[in-house]
Amino acid sequence: MSKLMKSWVESANSDKSPFPLNNLPYGVFSMGEEDPRCGVAIGNLILDVAYLEEEGVIVLDDEPVLDLPFWNEVMELGQATWADLRARLIDLLSEDGDPVLLDDIEMRSRAFVAMDEAQLHLPIVVSEYTDFYAGKQHAQNMGAILRGSPDLPANWLHIPIGYNGRASTVVVSGTDIRRPLGQTKAPDADMPSFGPTKRLDIELEMGAIVGANSAMGQPISVDQADAAIFGYVLLNDWSARDIQGWEYQPLGPFQGKGFGTTISPWIVTAAALEPFRAPTPEREKELLPYLAGSKDGLYDIDLEVLMQPEGALTATSLANTNYNRMYYSAAEQLCHHSIGGCAMNVGDLLGSGTISGPSRSEYGSLMELSWAGREPFMLETGEKRGFIEDGDTLTLRGTAKGDGYQIGFGDCVGTILPAISTPFETK
Ligand code: CA
């Protein structure tokens, strides 16, 4: 197991810190009215890498690429630059590295900001968003709930199933989500009805961020896909189950998913997660040869779902599971995505699919935790829930545990606002 890399930033050396030197995740931040720019989390601070680039302490390209409100330009520079940047940051921040920052008191005072005083923004321009369905337990649970049988669809063990989602409503943690309006139909009703969803849900997922372009018509192998993934975020694929249930056949989810997807603020790089690689489970049906790769494609990342009703002092932990529960890796998904000729772009976001483990305490959606509302669960406040109510705050948390350190993502949080009451009134 890999050990803590020590930094002269003291707060980064605590085994409680989600942002030790081993992590160095990438985000976009601003202070007050300043323009948002690239930053790197270290301990309880943000390193202003745009400033260090301006000072010539970090050099990635002829033009500045860090004084921007997204990491897409850095991704565009390619894998060798990604590695150079990480190596430079480790050199600048480690106990026994280049002292240029450590020794310059004025530069040091300008180069860091307190994380809890900064505003965090979406770290990338999301080019497109694709959502997969790669959790076997989740697929079985949804089959049992919706169709009365946990049998997987005939294609499930052969294809990493996905659909093209909406990039326009991917938002950073902390953004409120408005309860969506839509069309639903009760099984015994003659006609559908219109109104706010009554079955608002989360989906616990990991998001993989594609960091390399591929040309239309040019497939990407699993190994090429693995190398093309820049990093990972936590992803909450908010879902309106009643809207989804009425609309999803025959073409898949649409309005039940299009109203919001929340990601955590820090991109944890694939490089930082390298020590935590985990294999996909044994294949129940041999995959077709084009889906073969040489590396373990999953990561050992503990995941947690928490719910906090409005006014409650504490959040209730609803579920604990692990990203290594997935059946397909992000690299397999990316390969499959490109295999027919679909061009992939820097900033493409791939949702893993809901991550659910084998027991109920490991289920990654409220649909499963309350078994479609039929078996509500209890919160620490004494309230019962089947689905999300207005004012509820949902949090996803992820941690990879090393020897004396941990890798965190920053919480992935969203609070639900009541549905809009006058939908067509112009503001
Ligand atoms: Ca999903």
Image: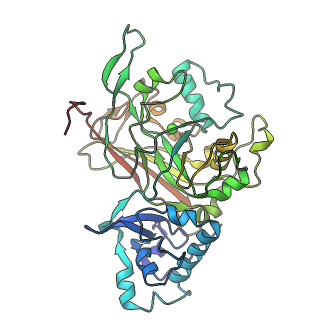
Q: Residue at x 61, y 44 (%)?
A: 325
Residue 178 sits above or below residue 345 on the image: above
Q: Quadrant of residue 131?
A: top right
Give the quadrant of residue 121.
Answer: bottom left
Q: Is residue 363 above or below residue 186?
A: below
User: Percent position (x, y) of residue 371?
Assistant: 47, 27
Above-or-below relation of 232 to 364: below
Q: How is the image coloured?
A: rainbow
Question: In this view of the protein, which residue sits in the foreground, 88 or 399?
Answer: 88
Residue at 54% across, 88% down:
98
Q: Position of residue 381 (x, y in %)?
A: 29, 41
- Residue 361's spot in the image, x, y percent? 50, 39
Q: Quadrant of the C terminus?
A: top left
239 left or right, relative to 383: right
Q: Quadrant of the N terminus?
A: bottom right
- Eyeballing the image, is 50 above or below 309? below
